[in-house]
Image: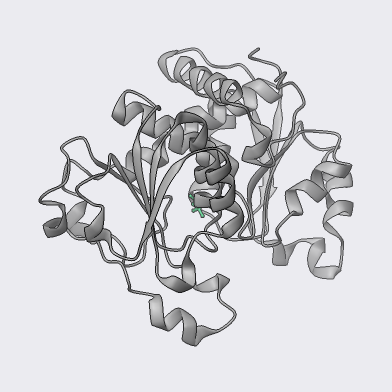
Amino acid sequence: MDFLDKNIISIEDFSKDDILKILSTAEEIEKSNNNKLLEGKILATLFFEPSTRTRLSHESAMLRLGGKVLGFSDPSMTSGKKGETLQDTIRMVHHYCDVIVIRHYLEGAALEAAKVSKVPIINAGDGANQHPTQTFLDLYSIKKTQNRLDNVKVAIVGDLKYGRTVHSLAKGISHFSPELYFVAPKSLQMPDYILDNLTKNNINFMETQNIEDIIDKVDILYMTRIQQERFDNNEEYEKVKDIYELNKSMLKGCKSNMRIFHPFPRVNEINVDVDETPHAYYFEQAGNAVPVRQALFSLVLGAKK
Ligand code: CP
């Protein structure tokens, strides 16, 4: 793919070679001391849903590249509150910047933004649909911790129904012949369209409701939060909210190379006693967001080829 001026909307738009290009560009940037590749460029961050890591790491990436940042993280203080449509907002903001990062509560919002934008749109999460840049940093983190991407055994635990990070990850990692284990209660299992896609691509996967069934087998244990905000019915949330609580004692039989990932924020699904173990990698994983997002900005704005 020629990345120049491209939107980053869905992980499905990226081939294996594209993903490897993004990761190698991130490695190159992380190793280099002089990365003022985007002086004079402006990033706009439009966040219609709460975020800590995704917004701040995009902003950090642009600032470290020598660019500047504008935007909002409280949509109630924008003209959206007065009824302005998303597409009208984009038709203005693209005059103010060189690239837009958008998070929205509606599935498909980033694609709708891209249809009218004159600058690249980066999807930072659209409802329960996709979070493609999280997948690039997850794959970067897998490569860093396992020294490879191919044939890795990955368990994904928690809210697999509404979890946009895991929808994107299941698709992104399928280029690298993984063995996948999906751990979720019956009400939050991975959607059929993702399982069908894995089957079509001959990817081995197993579904279970118990972490104990898989914890000794895997290289990556990818925990996720049960997302209260995605449930229509709070009673359903109450039934499953504390279903997985990983703690240090559960790690006794796991492989020495096993690393625990989480896109964060966490609630109760990883006890803080896990933080002190060599298996905890979630804070470093969040740090890997910066070189990966630096790579994405550099590629779509043509500072890296
Ligand atoms: N990983 C992630 O999307 O975190 P935030 O919701 O804090 O951005």
Percent across and percent down for residue 79 are: 82, 62
Q: Is residue 141 left or right of residue 296?
A: left
Picture layout, residue 87 above or below residue 203? below
Which residue occupies the foreground of this view, 49 or 248? Answer: 248
Residue at the far bottom: name it.
235
Which residue occupies the foreground of this view, 88 or 256? Answer: 256
Q: Is residue 191 in sight in this rendering?
A: yes
Q: Is residue 224 left or right of residue 130?
A: left
Q: What is the total number of numbered labels drawn onto the structure image?
A: 0
Picture layout, residue 258 above or below residue 65? below
In which quadrant of the rendered view does residue 259 lie? top left
Position of the C terminus, as image quadrant, is: top right
Q: Is residue 227 in sight in this rendering?
A: no
Q: How is the image coloured?
A: one colour
Percent across and percent down for residue 201 are: 55, 38
Q: Is residue 99 left or right of residue 49?
A: right
Q: Going 66% across and 15% down the picture, which residue do you hit?
A: 303
Picture layout, residue 141 above or below residue 248? above
Position of the N terminus, as image quadrant, is: top right
Q: Going 81% across and 38% down the picture, which residue do you hit?
A: 96
Q: Going 61% across and 16% down the picture, which residue do you hit?
A: 37
Percent across and percent down for residue 60 are: 52, 35
Percent across and percent down for residue 245 are: 26, 66
Which residue occupies the foreground of this view, 160 or 246? Answer: 160
